[in-house]
Amino acid sequence: MQSIASLEQTLLDHLRQLPPDKQQEVLDFAEFLRQKKILPSTPSAQPSLQELASLPLSQRHRILAPLIADTAADFTTDPALSEFSALDSEDWEFPDDAP
């Protein structure tokens, strides 16, 4: 097994050879691993909004992706979410408007 200093140097050498977008992916993954260690969660637990906000963007997207589909389905099937009575035409009529 490599020493910590040797491992860090090897990692830096590999990282420097990657294009910037891949370097960002490595950073996101390292941040994910760090957060996973700091914020261990049970498989069924959803992170709080504060925990979610502290995660790297790519990790947030992975967590939220399945929820987006469910939310979209709710908006197409739940009348309470698809009614916009506050935007009825009479709400936009003003006394000075000509008929």
Image (tube, rainbow, N blue to C red):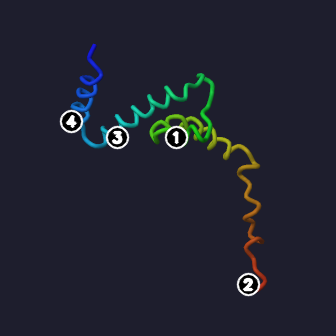
Q: Earlier in the sequence, mark 3 or mark 4?
A: 4
Q: Which mark is residue 24?
A: 3
Marks 3/4: CA distance?
Answer: 13 Å
Q: Secondary structure at mark 3?
A: helix
Which marked residue is nearer to the observer: mark 4 or mark 2? 4
Residue type at tag 4: Gln
Residue for badge 1: 54
- Residue 91 drawn at (x, y percent): 76, 71
Q: Which mark is residue 39?
A: none
Q: Secondary structure at mark 2?
A: loop
Residue for badge 4: 17
Residue type at tag 2: Asp
- Residue 71 drawn at (x, y percent): 63, 42
How crowded is the residue under tag 4: few (<14 C-alpha within 10 Å), some, or many (20+)? Answer: few
Horizontally, residue 85 falls left or right of residue 6, namely: right
How crowded is the residue under tag 2: few (<14 C-alpha within 10 Å), some, or many (20+)? Answer: few
Q: Earlier in the sequence, mark 3 or mark 1?
A: 3
Q: Are marks 4 and 2 in contact (CB under 8 Å)?
A: no
